[in-house]
Image (cartoon, grey):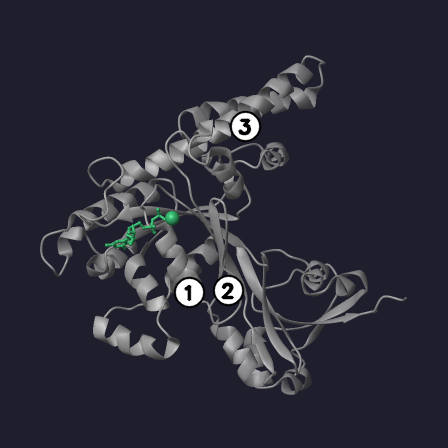
Amino acid sequence: MGFSVGLVGLPNAGKSTVFNALTAAGAEVGAYPFTTVGRNLGARVIPDERLDTVARITRPVKVTPTALEIVDIAGLVPGAHRGEGLGNQFLGHIREVDLIGHVVRCFENERVAPVDGRADPVRDAETVELELALADLDTVERRLERARRRAKGGVGADQADVETLERLRESLARGIPARRLALASGATALVRELFLLTSKPHLYIGNVSDQDFEVAAAIGANRSEPGGSPRGPTSPGLAGWAALVAHAARSGTPAVPVAAAVEAEWAALPITERALWQEEFGLAISGGVSLVRAAYEHLNVMTFYTVNENEARAYTVTKGTSAVAAAGKVHTDMEKGFIRAEVVRFSDLERAGSMAAARQKGTLRAEGRDYVVQDGDILYFRFAPPAN
Ligand SMILES: Nc1nc2c(ncn2[C@@H]2O[C@H](COP(=O)(O)OP(=O)(O)O)[C@@H](O)[C@H]2O)c(=O)[nH]1
Ligand SMILES: [Mg+2]
């Protein structure tokens, strides 16, 4: 499985609706919805025009896109860090994901009660963020106690740990996420070891009403102010979304609007009926494509491809992955017996029009195990099969 996005947020923010919109839209391939206590797992195929082109050129039997795992995590209530609600279990689920998709409710609906009184997206977002920071504070304090005991032994490294942990504690206590703290390069290993929730990349998902969606998207892209709405006066939902966008900008966090209810309804339709329904609705419904793209970009990942006559396939890996590690994503035998990778850039293959032509033009290169794979590379691994 590829990378995962965990949906967190207050009850009734629309997490499960976003989950349904994403997973049902991608159900053509590889959806595997199942539920355990406190979470749902599913997958959303990542739309990939380059893979379509590769497949058109190489005509394989099968085309396999890469997918984003979506985890719908229930149970965040104030006090979760102390074990209230689903508490610890919930925090454990968040610890496992690669990116936090923080769903914030930006729609008004008399049938869905806001958590406490009036809808206020920034307050809701801060409630969740504080809960995550307090859970991390707990982790850091426990580690700090240990580090202090060890530092008494007079080891310099332990003293450095104490200083790092004290800085972390101080900022977490003020609700500042760990990812916003610039730490010395020597401290990164320690921080990684702590698996802090607030050190994960974070993305806001504003759940807006379908009437607000287009203006919300423009506000999110800094193209419009809520007052510029073609519908005249600003709706409370839009004002809330605009405030959330400003809140997100202060911490350099991306914010993406989604009209979750409509997207989920659309995604539940048979594929043959989707286009017609969308036309009637007059809305650019996409099964959350912009959300998936934003998550993908924020994960610091890239895509490489493998092709043969059977299959054209996309793989998602962290930027900076070496050729031998990429081979390991395809098959452990390829990693163990790695000889070399034959590499064509996507643009060269597209220009050449076939693998044979790319080879003839000399755009197919042989690279060794340490070659740093580039986004869009098409890789063919030469390897020695295991002897047995
Ligand atoms: N009007 C409106 N209702 C929504 C929207 N998204 C979710 N809801 C409703 O809000 C309620 C809570 O949604 P749900 O996804 O279960 O929230 P969760 O508790 O965060 O998982 C449900 O009744 C949804 O139908 C939306 O975009 N617009
Ligand atoms: Mg839910």
Give the foreground label among 2 and 3.
2
Q: Residue at x 19, y 47 (%)?
A: 239
- Which dot marks residue 145? none
The type of residue carrying mark 3 is: Thr
- The residue sitting at 55% across, 55% down in the picture is 3
Percent coordinates x, y for residue 337 in the rendering: 81, 64
Q: Can you name the residue that lies furthest to the left here?
A: 232
Mark 1 surroundings: few (<14), some (14-19) or many (≥20) residues within 10 A? many
Residue furthest to the top: 152
Residue type at tag 1? Ala
Q: Is residue 376 depicted above or below 137 in this figure? A: below
Mark 2 C-beta to ligand 2 under 8 Å: no
**Contact (Cβ within 8 Å) of mark 1 with mark 2:** yes
Left or right placement of residue 294 versus residue 155 in this view: left
Secondary element under disc 1, as helix, strand or loop, is: helix
Amino acid, disc 2: Ala
- Image quadrant where one finds the N terminus: bottom right
Point out the frontmost of discs 1 and 3: 1
Mark 1 and mark 3 residues within 8 Å of each other at the beta carbon? no
Q: Is residue 350 among the parts visible in the rendering?
A: no
Look at the numbered disc 3 and give the secondary structure of its residue.
helix
Residue beneath label 1, please? 24
Quarter of the image containing the C terminus?
A: bottom right
Q: Which residue is mark 2?
A: 31
